[in-house]
Amino acid sequence: MARKSYEELRSYRWYGVDDLRSFGHRSRAKQMGYAREDWAGKPVIAIINTWSDINPCHTHFRDRAEEVKRGVWQAGGFPVEMPAISLSEPFQKPTTMMYRNLLALETEELLRSYPCDGAVLLGGCDKTTPALFMGAASMNIPALFVPAGPMLRGNWRGKTLGSGSDTWKYWAELRAGNITEDDWEEIEDGIARTPGTCMTMGTAATMMCAAEALGLTLADAGSIPAADSNHARMASRCGRRIVDMVWEDVKPSDIFTEKAFENAITTVMAMGGSTNAVVHLIAMAGRLGVELDLERFDEISRRTPFLANIRPSGQYLMEDFFYAGGLAGLLNEIKDILHLDCMTVNGKTLGENIEGKDIHNEDVIRRRGNAMSGEGGLAVLRGNLAPGGAIIKHIAADPALHTHTGPAVVFRDYNDMAARIDDPDLPVTKDSVLVLQNAGPQGGPGMPEWGMLPIPKKLLQDGVRDMVRISDARMSGTSYGTCVLHVAPESFVGGPLALVRDGDMIALDIPGRTLELLVDEAELATRKAAWKAPEAKFARGFGAIYAAHITQADKGCDFDVLEGTAPTPEPEIH
């Protein structure tokens, strides 16, 4: 493979030229204690670090950044750590999804405006993985990803706890009166006890493994627990590998092809991954000019067996998944439906990376003959209630509700739902369909994870644990239930979901992939004519920028001005 010369590196324009500006760059580098020998003749590697004091998923990234630097130095590169906005899933409001594109934009512009030849991206919390990918892909310089890794399992009175999934489970039991406040506090103490992301099959685990299938990580990196020493060694390997990637000029556009994205979708389906992966993968692909529509997801889901017995759709946690063979073991079991010739950042094909890998616990990662389900974890629905499509994680839903018709109980927004959901006089039964409006990209704002609407308290006390719920919101990957999500177009912009009224009959048919509002066309037309657009959420600031440029869920919720592959000029250095 032809290798670049030093003079061909981007950073040479900053450090190597004999002029006044380069004098300034070199003298300021020396001001920071670096010597000419530290950078001369070497690629500059940006380490984009999403650590912060308020991001529990990334608390170990201070150490991992140093371990990446060690690898960069060992391989003859010059590491430069650059902080980027930290999208902390538990704390940032109204939702991290509102800021995914901001991190993507920041990543792209950091890499463009500074003397960077390659990038190591440190992330893992739900929106961070796609955001870093989107920014690096649009910049299109050599880049690879250090996934944060899942935290270790939680514990409570001898029971294994999984973040998110068991939060929802025991919250329902608390509201039903089946556990005490003291029990609930003990669960709070034991559910999240190490650095790392959710250790269930949440969005974080889903996207980290999708990144490995795409070829964005080193082999076997996508599911290493954050607290495992393998994780620190992986970080240093990334530092060494990125230096060679720069010399070899291996860019995102060389790796992330249409076939690579199909591998990622197949991975999500086989793992029973998060519904959020649909929005993220569409947005990621769009940065490279690869068009993914919802039908592609449904087509791949129908032919992919669901093999990962991980909560919330299964029994185990990501720690178990890694030691049972990890993603490579799972992918080797379904290699006949993968594009094995796709290149990855380590210079090998996906097929080479998974060759000879095996499953070490066949209950955690099932063989095809004992699959959790004969098809993948997600289904795409269409109908007059969702002409732009909707998503459901049907493997986490009560099978008895896969085909269901019931009367709507409508909440106009989250506050309306929170105020009325536990009202003893709420006209609701187990057969009702709970509908949440104005929770989409514009309406939320940011399409928050409100899609797992709580079961009304009076029904919980009667033993009900699942109902059909429909919204234009998202749902945490750790969540479960018969929740129809991402309804497009959203109600805030006048989609059909805005027209639903209490008592309207709604028909869900997952096998038939349909979602229908059983109201005649003339009545819907009358309601549409009377509908009035809500007032804009923001008059200024980032919120106004967001509202002006965000796309709908079926288009990936990217900013329209960031999509595509139109060239952006390199900065002039004067």
Image (cartoon, grey):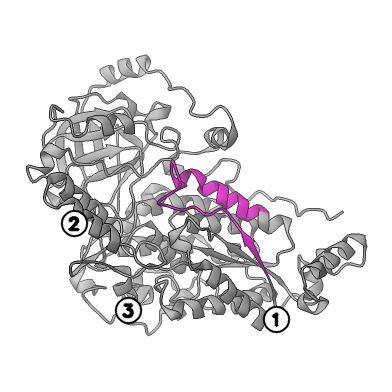
Circle 3 SS class: helix
**Residue 292 in view:** no
Label 3, on which residue? Answer: 323
Figure check: 85 above or below 33: above
Horizontally, is 283 left or right of 515 in the view? right
Between 544 and 206, the residue placed more toward the observer is: 544
Label 2, on which residue? Answer: 183
Question: Residue 95's spot in the image, x, y percent?
Answer: 43, 44
The alpha-carbon separation of the residues under discs 1 and 3 comes to 33 Å
What type is the residue that disc 1 sits on?
Gly
Residue neighbourhood size for the residue with mark 2, other residues' Cα within 10 Å, grouped as few (<14), some (14–19), many (≥20): some
Label 1, on which residue? Answer: 76
Taking the magenta stretch, the answer to whether it contains residue 95 is yes
Q: Quadrant of residue 483?
A: top left
Q: Nearer the viewer, mark 2 or mark 1?
A: 2
Question: Residue 134's spot in the image, x, y percent?
Answer: 55, 55
Between 290 and 479, the residue placed more toward the observer is: 479
Residue in the image at 57% along x and 70% along y:
65
Question: Residue 35's spot in the image, x, y percent?
Answer: 80, 76
Number of numbered discs on residues: 3
Q: Earlier in the sequence, mark 3 or mark 2?
A: 2
Horizontally, is 309 left or right of 90 in the view? left
Residue in the image at 45% along x and 69% along y:
212
